Amino acid sequence: MSNQFYKYVSELLIGFFKEEGINPGDRYFIQLEQKEELKALIDSLQTVNGVKKFTYQHEFGAVYETFAVTVNNVDLVVASTAENVTPDFLVTLRNEVGDQKGDWEGTALISLVSEQLDSIQGGSSDLQKEGMPLHPQSLFNNLRSDIENSELKKVDQTILFENLERLMEEQVINQVALLDFEEIFSVLSKGSIKDNDYQKFGLFKDYDLHTYTGKKLKNRLKENHELFEYVQRVHDFGTAEQDLEKKFSQNGVSELKKDNWVETPFTKVYNYAEEKEDENKNAKVKLEDLKIPNMQYWDRPLRENSTGYRKRQIIIFNNEKKDEFTLSAKFEISGKTIKNLDNEFISIPNYSKSNVAASAGRKNLTITIRPDHKKPTFSRVSYKHEKKSSLGCEFHIVVVPFGPEYLGDIKTKYVVNVKDARLELNSEVEELKLGFGKEDRTHEITTNNSTLTLDENEAVTIQPQADAFNEKDQLIINLIITQVILPILLKNELPETTPIRAVRIWRMKRELQDNFQLIQSNRLVIGNREFYTHAEYTAFFAWEKEWVNKDLMAARVDADELSEVELTINEDLKEAFSRFRNYFTSKGLIPSLCYVSDDMKTIAVEYIQTFINEIRRLKNEPHSWKARTDLMLLGTQKTADGIYFTPFHPLVIAYQLKVNDMLGKEEVDQSILNRLNPDALVPYIYDNNGDLFKPDSDQPIKEWVKFKTVNEVTVADASTYLARVTEDKLKQFEEHFSYLFAEKSKASFKVNVVNISNDREVLRGILLWIVNRIERKGAESLKPIEVSLYLKNSESSFDIFSRLKDPEKVSEYFNVRLSSKKYDEHDLLRFIRESLFYYKHSLDEPYRYAHVSFYKMQSQEDDALQHMDEMATGISLNGLVASVPSMKVDDHYRNGFGTKAYDFEHGDILLDTTYYTNELAANVRNKGNDTYRPEESISSRTTTDDEETLNKIFASSYWVTFVDPSVDLAFFQEYNRNLVVIHYSDQYSSSSRYDAITVTDKSRQYNTAIKEYLMNADFDLVVTEEDVVSTIKAFNAFNGEWLLRIIGSKGHFSREKLSIISAIKNTLAYFDHKDILWVPISLEEILRVAGAVGLDRKNGIFTAKNLGISGAHSDDLLLIGLETASDGIKVHFYPIEVKIGINNSQVIEKAKKQVDQTKKLFDEELRKYNDDGKVIFTNQFYRNFFVQLTIANASKIYQSGLWPEKEYNIADSVKAKLLKDDYEITDDLAEFIGRGAIVSFEKDRYVKKSEVEDDVTILYLAEEDGYRGIIDSVQLLTERMIEGKTDFRQEILIGNVYKVEDTANKNANRGVGTGKEEYPAGATSLNNDSTRFVPPGHTGEQEPPTALVEPTNKKVALEDVRILIGEVENSNKEVYWEFGHPQLANRHLLISGKSGQGKTYFMQCLLLEQAKQGISNIIVDYTEGFLPNQLEPEFVDYLGDKLIQKIVYNEQLPINPFRKNTRNIGGLEIAENDTDIAERIKSVFGAVYSTLGIQQLNAIYEATQNGIRKYEDEMSLKLLASELEELGSTYATSALSQIRPLIDRNPFNAQDFATIDWEQIINSEGQVYVIQLTGYPRDVQLIITEFILWDLWNHSVRHGSKNKPLPVILDEAQNLDHREFSPSARILTEGRKFGWSAWYATQFLRSQLESAELARLQNSSQKVYFAPPEQEVSTIAHSIAQDKTERGYWEKKLSSLRKGQCIVHGPLEHNGELTKPNVNVVNISPLGKRINRS
């Protein structure tokens, strides 16, 4: 404990007695834990006011001496058990005080003890009890008040408050001791929390705390404390690694298991915990399969949700009376930290342990069961990995000694209640059928807990009576089966009645590999699970039943009756079809309820192959029209509204087989399953009348494919997203043109809907927008919405809406929830009707003006046949994912089935079926009468509107949204009207189709916004119209929404998005490689597209959180690199974070973390195989998503002309491999450019560089680059980088270091291009065995000598003098000391760093640079670092006779320390007097000789004055000695003895008043003048140096000028005098005006200099820091950066500096001006390079 704390406690006690009062005879005690505490408190009490000695003589003992404190006229005697005082004696003292006699009269007593003494406590008051000053609550109140009134920072106050609160919470459980409050008081005393204090408060040091306030700050501290306590607890218990793994990632475990774990910054600890949490999120321990060999059993989930699925209800039928058997549960395991199951997490309750045991293997849990044959055996076993319910399963088991036939009717209803040892039925049971015998009987249950015996010969129908249920609506029936009692509890509760949808049936039958049974026409049963049917598929199921029962091969529906269509087909095919259909007949099933079993697959493949063979055979029969048309009808069903491919059609069957093959039992997210449909595999078919049909995707059941006439399907697949497009466009228009819809405005929102016949989804989108607006802004905010419909037919969904009166029917028909927090559904519908108006027009009427027009292009669709290999493919993943592509051919667009860019290889069942079905469909054209044309399919040739029609649409609308356009972006970009594509949406199911494109011909505002942004930049940009157009095209290429959002933004968004265009261009240029095509994709675009197609599920890859996107918009990119190599296609996924603004180290660190997280996400979600080597379909689907995205974006870049020199028109052969998932995702580039990148545009950056940190490339760019990159072409940027015309280093560009042919031997390239330079050990010096500096780029081996270059030493005009320092690390940028720049604050230079880091070498480099430019330098060498044999040979050889060594030891220095000089005060020159000289001499001696006391220095002062008066200008050191001797005092004698070494050596020669000619040296043009002080002791050297500085200073005052540089170099400057009146202080503060350029080189700063002295040194305009001593790191970092986070960054940089590397802190020249001080890590340029520079 600190003395201050006890002083605080003492004052608290005395204050208490003064305030509360104290009376004679009062007795108190305090019990402390340790004797040391006791002594400290006694010592502290002795220092308070009013203390006096107190003596007591006991009649039988020795004299007892202590002290008393007078309080309110009462002497408070302090007694203690210290110093051998016994407890009994303290009792005696207590009694004496009570008697108040003799010496004890008028006294009170306080006893201080360090042990439990009941005898003392009995008669004394405890000062630590409630209400007393040392009670925790009292201390809490006092300290809280002190904290509130302190000057502590808010963060520090909060830490103390939180600690106080925790102490008081602990008080409830454990007694809090006085000692526990010490740390809080200690901080109050110090005035701040220091780094080493955090652990005392149970906290890790948190450098980010200052960024939090209020509740967030408290939460941050709480998290910190909890993690600290956890780690501390782990270390205390000695189980560090094992327990740390539960809470932290592996990186965290490695760091936190160390003994110095408390020193880990909280940011790291928090990140480790987050990493672990992320790992846990992806963790999965899920029951995959359950088996009980050779046993019959039932297994069902508790409920139909994820929680219920984990609680298995199992009945095992042990009718063979086995004594023991095993249940094997196989788990699916995933996640980075979960490698296998663990016995630790198995739990068996005590009541089950006698019957079961369990053990865990890698993925299997084995449960051994030993049943009782005389009664049901109930058991429960649970496995919860890491004790988390979500990671595991519970098994509720009952074993019964009879067969399942007894319990047949409860198979889908039961629950196993292990605890109460019974079965439960949660349903409203009217009757229950049990048993299997031939004798039927009915048994009424009239009483609760009744018994019923089941005989094997009978089947009993149980009818529970209402009166039998108890008050909880429960009824227990005790069944006796084979003499075993089985209790069953009936619960009179309605079961869940939510019907099962078709998509779930399709999913479950595959995952469970089981069939559904249709029971009583409205229930479906699979295994032990039961569901109600849904109306969406009842008609389809009914049709399938008729197909099976009536042996149909083709059918039609007339008047709701299904009738047979007779076909004449090949007998082999007929038999194959019959075998397939009979499979369902024999099982009493229908195809939509059947899973693909091995038997079914065999029969189905035979049927499909026979169908394909029949089509092939028809090629050779020219007159086969009947065979063709009948074959096309096989498996089809004609209805009044279309044609169906039924589940009996070969294409549908082949698709289901492919789904089963590729997905297997894998649990695939529903959002992905929704994307799997066969409807796009056959884009067009003909009916018997020759009419053209196309698929209608709006089908509830995946085993049926519906086709409608092309006229009825005007927006094709767009119907699935059109509502969203409509809603978004209305919302976006309102946001961007809000002034049109001001609150008081009566203007209506005008919408046109043109040529969209099935406009239900358009109206749905409008309704969604209205409901959303009412919810956000209230009903009163609604404006009239006028919708003009231009239709071919008369009926519209708007008409249907107008007729629907009931809100429920409106909601059901339009799939819109009419719900609000403010209004009921009837009010909502009324508001909609009051605001929504529609008008119907024919298509040929003039268009009314609209804000937004939704338009389906009036195209002329002509069907034709074309070769499949000439049409772009819409196929991927072997046909499982497909779309109908669009392709421009001459002046029209084509749609249809194609194989171009897929390389169809026959042999795949689905692809073959698709290929030949399309071929067959084409050859029934003209009813099959045309000559058979193999390898052709039906295509639709679309001719777009004529120009006049389009111009009318543009003229009448502000925005035009083209719905499901057959055209692409290029159509609008090439259109001869001044159009701007402001928004588009695409689902990327195909790389050639768009769902909607929004266009405007009101383009001026977009052009103006971009042009103004660029013109307003302070970089003299020349912006042309072509630049604006190319920028707009770039927006269109990268993101479908950016351009739309630019208008109406407040500027920041514009800046961000325009800079992203620049970031894309710069990264494409920087990462360019001849064998890699980089395709940039906006992560925001990924989210947008994923959301449009329903892939943005909570835990999927496509979420803002997982992709690291915060807020509404993102600046993040993904570069996808396509590498073509001899061994196939490799794909690189390279995430990029773009940061714009003041990007401090905290921003960069956060960005690095996000890059790493995003990369890990892609690594995990896009790997093709799981740990068992099995293909993961979910990942295949995601891979395909990104492939489509890549192909589509490459196409957009190609069309936009962003980089015409690069081949963005991806070859068909490459596309084919991508679409087939035949490629490898690789990390080959990671060793060169890391796993991702950060592009940082910074406002005050003047040095561009790239570096790899923590496996992330960071491109540091200036704000100007953000602007220029918008205008400059990618090709120009690339050429400049390749040619070395930028700051980026050419040698590390991947185009130079990554060789595709080398990838097989990666180790050959290890370490290349990492951005880190390794320098070899120093070379041996030429003249001694010590090592000397080896500059960057040189090896340590002996190198050929540098050819001698004659020194130019040409005098350069001062304003042009620039001194090269070196190159910025990871950059080509050279950094200069702008020595002659008129804006430079001063020419002083501070150089610091520990010994051996290259300071002296660096000074030689600078001296050489100055000599070359005709500037002379003076070196005062008192360190012997500039002796000839210590200098670099190159330096000595180059300077030749310009290097002068003035050896003072031999020649003496011609200066007189006692000379009278003139001083400059305010421009006036004033001569020194005797006092000034005496003070100067005294000051110099006092600075060097610290042993000289004040009296001794005064003696020197007096002797100096006496000597000057006597000898005037002839005064010298020897005369000073005489004067001291003459004084004769002790002080004068001792002073003389200490300075005698200097006087005896007499280094100054002032005879004949000779002085050194400083002016000649200064004007010598490039001379390096070394005043060499070798030979003298260090103290003499320092004295000489100080006198030289004084002489130089005085010379400069008389003759100096700011335009005449006076460089003076001083090594080991920490040893000089830096006090306020020293020469150094004057030089640093006033020297600029006299031309001074003082170079101070030092090893130490803070440790040897006072704050004011250090501040003067830090005022040097140029500072160069080499690797410092450890104790100096913090000081230097603090001078570089004020922000705590930034300081931490620079501390790390300082600590990692290599020899020859430094941090330069000073201004840079930029466009003729000096910047504010910049900080850069710089590699010193070697002497050889400098010598050879022109």
Image (tube, rainbow, N blue to C red):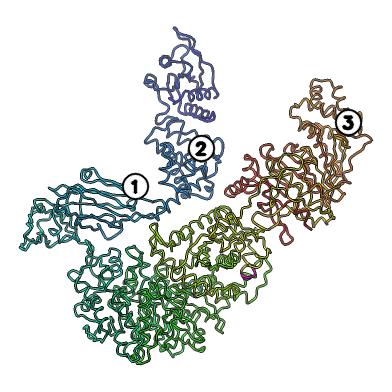
**Number of numbered labels in the structure image:** 3
Mark 1 and mark 2 lie on one chain; the one further toward the N terminus is 2
- Up-down: is 1619 above or below 79? below
Kind of residue at disc 3: Ser
Find numbered disc 1 in the image and state the secondary structure of the residue it sits on.
Answer: loop
User: What residue is disc 2 on?
Assistant: 146
C-alpha span from label 3 to label 1: 91 Å
Whether residue 1275 is in magenta: the answer is yes
Q: Are marks 2 and 3 in contact (CB under 8 Å)?
A: no
Looking at the picture, tell me which residue is in the foreground, 975 or 1216: 1216
> In the rendered view, does 1330 fall on the left or right side of 740?
right
Range of residues picked out in magenta: 1270-1276
Q: Secondary structure at mark 3?
A: loop
Q: Label 3 belongs to which residue?
A: 1516
Give the residue at mark 1: 342
- Where in the figure is residue 1079, as x and y percent of width and height? 53, 68
